[in-house]
Amino acid sequence: MTDKPWAGRFAERTDMSVERFTSSIQIDRRLYPYDILGSIAHCRMLAKTGVITDEEASKLVEGLGGIQRDLDHGNFQFDDRLEDIHMHIEDRLLQDVGKVAQKLHTARSRNDQVVLDMRMFVLDATGMIMKSLQDLRLAFAELATQHCETIMPGYTHTQRAQPVILGHHLMAYYEMFTRDYLRFKDSYARTDVMPLGAAALAGTTYPIDPHYTAELLGFSTVAANSMDTVSDRDFVMEFLSDASICMVHLSRLSEELILWSSSEFGFVTLPDAFATGSSIMPQKKNPDIPELVRGKTGTVFGNLVNLLTMMKSLPLAYNRDMQEDKAPTFETADTLKACLGIYIKMLPKLTFNKEAMQQAASSGFLNATDMADYLVNSGMPFRKAHSVVGRAVAYALEHKKELHELSLKELQTFSKSIEQSLFDHLSLKTMVSRRLSSGGTSQKNVKGAIKKALEQLRKEKAEEKKFFSEKR
Ligand code: ARG
């Protein structure tokens, strides 16, 4: 190992405890593929602009390729004294190709280098998450296709409210995950900015060509202000925010599956291969996957708060605090990918208990609003109809019946305008099929929403190439 790059100015060697405390190699070693790609592009740019010769660039690029292979195969010794992945690779390059390695860092600082690596990591992670979100949305649309006629209770305040189609409930999740997809797509564009050239903070005196480096690495644009470039971690905070909102949705889905798979609800059966048992209670089948997804939401939220707090008081430009951005970013990417992946596999295997859902929708006065609507159609103002039905509900409760179980005679004591036709009006099928307002639960709307979703997914597939740069 060589001396520290800054050894010239220092009279004392770094204390061992400081080496350990400041080292980030155990975490940021994961950035090596990006660091090497970035260094290769930087070398090529330096050669193109005449800062180094073509021959020097070839030696450096060849050396970097060898280091990449060694890292891929685990033939690489890590050492806290070399702090981070950037210094490890540079040090190894010096051993492998000799003095020419000292030219690699011309017109560059670790401050812009680390932003480049992190941007490439976040872009790749975002692309993978977008792909998973497409798969998840497809799984919801396909599941909804099988349940365009399945009727269940819709809830407010966790109390039965009005009947809805299960496909409609499932497509609500399609909408949430579509917004997540679009949020990631949006932040992708702001992350897709090449930072090299900012150097330590003020830019560089060398005649560099950052647009060429950007082109080599597949970036769409180059950074505008060198001070902002090295001190900006907005793209990380956006990634963590997008991930947190997505975890909110996954957690709400999990909560519903946990409730619905309980004996109290009995709406859904989880596949055996995606549930676990108890070590003591032989009868148990536990929804551990949804529970863990719900639990991991805490990790992801915590990582967002971590980053926001770490950044909030930093003066411009680079501060070492920012080294702490890596663990929360990596952990969030891994957690979200894992949660999406497991749901993509599990969703198509859920079995819904149509009878239990229909049964639950048939009791609890879910047709009260529709009875009021019936009276409104016969000319009664809605407020009056609401109170008439309220009295009918009280009467039915007293007689332990549902509204549709009362006789025509009994019903007519509440309003003269009630006729035999009310009974069809209060049937589950009629109630849902009449909800034709835009975005309402009618079977017709649900089928339309699924068709639109499948078309949208096909369109996205056609344009998705952009998010998986072949250069990276
Ligand atoms: N390991 C550092 C980080 O992740 C790299 C940048 C170090 N720059 C510096 N001036 N110490 O932030």
Image (spheres, rainbow, N blue to C red):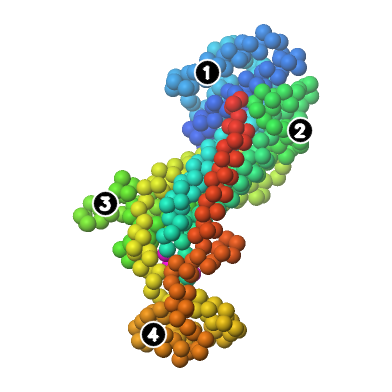
Closer to the camera, 265 or 17?
A: 265
Do labels 4 and 1 touch, CB within 8 Å?
no
Q: Secondary structure at mark 1?
A: helix
**Residue highlighted by disc 4:** 407
Image coordinates of residue 45 in percent, x first then y, are 71, 19
Question: Within the image, what quadrant is residue 454 found in?
Answer: top right
Residue 151, visible in the rendered structure: yes
| Disc sitting over residue 277 in the figure | 3
Residue at mark 4 to residue at mark 3: CA–CA distance? 48 Å
Q: Secondary structure at mark 2?
A: loop
Q: Secondary structure at mark 4?
A: loop
Do labels 3 and 1 touch, CB within 8 Å?
no
Residue positioned 52% across, 58% down in the render: 444
- Up-down relation of residue 336 to residue 295 (above or below): above
Q: Secondary structure at mark 3?
A: loop
Earlier-in-chain disc, 3 versus 2: 2
Do labels 2 and 4 touch, CB within 8 Å?
no
**Residue highlighted by disc 2:** 202
Residue positioned 35% across, 53% down in the render: 351
| Disc sitting over residue 67 in the figure | 1
Closer to the camera, 199 or 286?
A: 286
Q: What range of the chain is rendered magenta? A: 152-156
Q: Is residue 124 left or right of residue 292?
A: right
Residue at mark 3 to residue at mark 1: CA–CA distance? 47 Å
Residue at mark 4 to residue at mark 1: CA–CA distance? 84 Å
- Up-down relation of residue 157 to residue 184 (above or below): below
